Image (cartoon, rainbow, N blue to C red):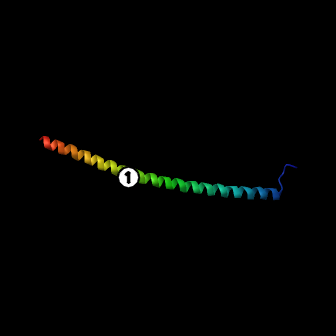
Amino acid sequence: MQDLATDPQVRETELRLQKEIKEVESRLSLEIKNVEVKVAETRADLIRWVVAVGVLQTTALTAVLLKIARLI
């Protein structure tokens, strides 16, 4: 019977666990926000690259077509 926890011990453990859970939730929330920021930055970088590659591709295609047109 000595192994049984008393009500105050159970309550103390419960409060400690609730505090730890809140701390973990807080850290997790911060990490999620950091990931969301990184995703937004990556998306912006990707859009810039896609636009740049599109412009380069259009320029290259135009140059090839002009070169072919001069040969005819």
Q: Which quadrant of the structure image shows residue 61?
A: top left
Percent of width and height locating residue 35: 52, 53
Residue displayed at 76% across by 55% down: 13
Percent of width and height locating residue 14: 75, 57
> Does residue 21 appear anywhere in the picture?
yes
Would residue 47 be found to the left or right of residue 38 on screen? left
Residue displayed at 42% across by 54% down: 44
Badge 1 element = helix
Residue displayed at 45% across by 51% down: 42
Q: Nearer the viewer, residue 60 or 10?
A: 60
The C terminus sits in image quarter: top left
Would residue 36 be found to the left or right of residue 7 on screen? left
Q: Label 1 amino acid?
A: Arg
Is residue 69 positioned above or below 47 on the image? above
Percent of width and height locating residue 54: 31, 49
Q: Nearer the viewer, residue 5 or 37?
A: 37
- Farthest residue, direction top: 71
Would residue 2 be found to the left or right of residue 60 on screen? right
User: Mark 1 = which residue?
Assistant: 48
